[in-house]
Amino acid sequence: MRLLLTFVLMAGGAMAQSGHHLYVVNKGADSISIVDAASLDVLHTIPVGGNPHELAVAPDGSKLYVGNAGGNSISVVDLQSFEETERIETPDFAFPHAIVFTPDGRHALVTSERNQKIVLIDAVSDTVIRAIDSEQGGTHMAVMDAAGEWAYFTNRESHTVSFMDLGDFSIAAAIAVGQGAEGFALSPDGAEIWVSNRNAASVSVIDVERREVVHTMAVGERPNRVTFTPDGRHVLIPMGSGEVYVFDAATREVIDTAQVGSAAGGILPSPDGGRVFVASGGSNAVHVIDTATWDVVDEVPVGRNPDGLALR
């Protein structure tokens, strides 16, 4: 299998991936794994707080934040020493989950899922500034636009997607989608948000400018995360069955599927779009999909129950 991947990487321009690292949260091992995105070697395994779910790398690449959902804290991991250097704590954390940095690296936003809050952090000093009421149940995942003007959040219990104006960190809208809004992704051009509705076995497509759902597609059971390929042509969504659905973004139709391990979660494409990485909690590995064929071409053993991913 590794020989096959080597051939695929050479044919697809592996040199474009040189220097990139894949960061993997291991929920069941209270750790993160750092993987060389080209060779797929695990370079470091770093202990963090209890039951981590998501992570994000600072824009300058100096550190990352890990949301310790079970530990009600954020681990700060230095990416020079590859050690946890401190933990950010606040009474406003109740199952801290998703994290996004502003493009200038000055702030980070963390969803606090069990108390309807979004916590604003000074990402220079690693201190909490304040908590913002989401007024939505189960505020879960987070995405930010490239300009750093808007952030978006799924709310699993209210079945909505929130729009936050980053000019003043205020909630401007909450758009109703399907039951159990879970993972989501903003298209590369910023025009659409695709949302996986876990309990409804559907996907909602939101027109960002109009702030309304313009299309809903029935899919398999328990759709989880969502990612666009960098060119915006395809959308990939893992299902509870371990299948990854591949959509044509323009026609909104499924054009292929890939079978990965059970409990598939975090999903991200490589920067050149040649591969997609999928965390499989059931197989304690990250699976690698070749986007030329939509076949799984390799897997990387990591820690127990991997989920959230980041790539830089």
Image: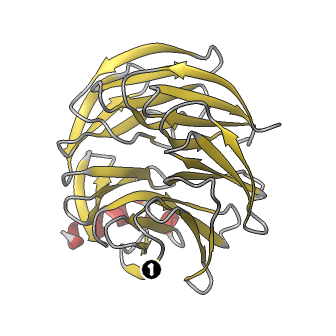
Residue appearing at x 31%, y 72% in the figure:
303
* Left or right for 224, reference 117: left
* Left or right for 64, reference 238: right
Q: Secondary structure at mark 1?
A: strand
In the displayed orientation, state which residue is furthest to the right.
167
User: Is 63 placed above or below 166 here?
Assistant: below
**Quarter of the N terminus within the rendering:** bottom left
**Quarter of the C terminus within the rendering:** bottom right
Q: Is residue 207 visible?
A: no
Percent x, y for residue 24? Answer: 42, 65
Q: Which residue is mark 1?
A: 47
* Left or right for 147, reference 69: right
* Left or right for 95, reference 294: right
Q: Nearer the viewer, residue 291 or 177?
A: 177
Percent x, y for residue 308? Answer: 42, 57
Residue appearing at x 60%, y 30% in the figure:
135
Q: How is the image coloured?
A: secondary structure
Task: Give the class, few, some or many, for how many residues have Cα within 10 Å of label 1's Cα (few <14, many ≥20).
Answer: some
Residue appearing at x 38%, y 75% in the figure:
39
Q: Is residue 192 visible?
A: yes
Residue appearing at x 65%, y 69% in the figure:
61
Type of residue at label 1? Pro
User: Is 188 placed above or below 23 here?
Assistant: above
